[in-house]
Image (cartoon, rainbow, N blue to C red):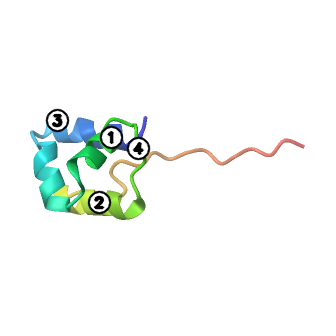
Amino acid sequence: MDIGIRIRDYLESNGIKQVWLSEKTHIAMPKLNLSLNGKRRLSFEEYQTICWAIGVGVDTFLEAKPPAVEVH
């Protein structure tokens, strides 16, 4: 699942409005909305700022991925 969608789900579960997050992070609402709906990739700086604003660690929304397997 896309990080933006995981963040959106977290916001909804915790009663946090996108408008509030946009104001707190200074990320324009259209940009934020696209990102939280999986239609735009967040920059790492935006991601860090969102995590700071909602008070979670940057590892909160990350998923571990298995290493790529080399085929010989």
Task: Give the x, y percent position of residue 40.
Answer: 40, 44
- State the residue position of label 1: 34
The secondary element bearing badge 1 is classed as helix
Q: Earlier in the sequence, mark 3 or mark 4?
A: 3
Residue occupying image coordinates x 9% and y 39%? 15
What whole-number distance in Å separates the C-alpha atoms at marks 4 and 1?
5 Å
C-alpha distance separating marks 3 and 4:
19 Å
Residue 36: x %, y % from top left: 30, 41
Instruction: Tell which circle, 4 or 2, labels the residue nearer the N-terminal end.
Output: 4
Task: Specify which label sits upstream in the sequence, 1 or 3.
Answer: 3
Q: Earlier in the sequence, mark 4 or mark 1?
A: 1
What residue sits 39% from the left and 37% below the top? 38
Q: Quadrant of residue 52?
A: bottom left
Labels 1 & 3 near each other (Cβ < 8 A): no
Name the residue carrying label 3. Answer: 12
Query: In the image, which is nearer the foreground, mark 2 or mark 1?
Result: 1
Number of residues whose C-alpha sits closer than 10 Å to that of mark 1, classed few (under 14), some (14–19) or many (20 or more): some
Query: Which residue matches tag 4?
Result: 40
| Crowd band around label 4 with a 10 angstrom C-alpha radius: few (<14), some (14–19), many (20+) | few
Q: What residue type is labelled 3?
A: Glu
SS type, badge 2:
loop
Type of amino acid under label 2: Gly
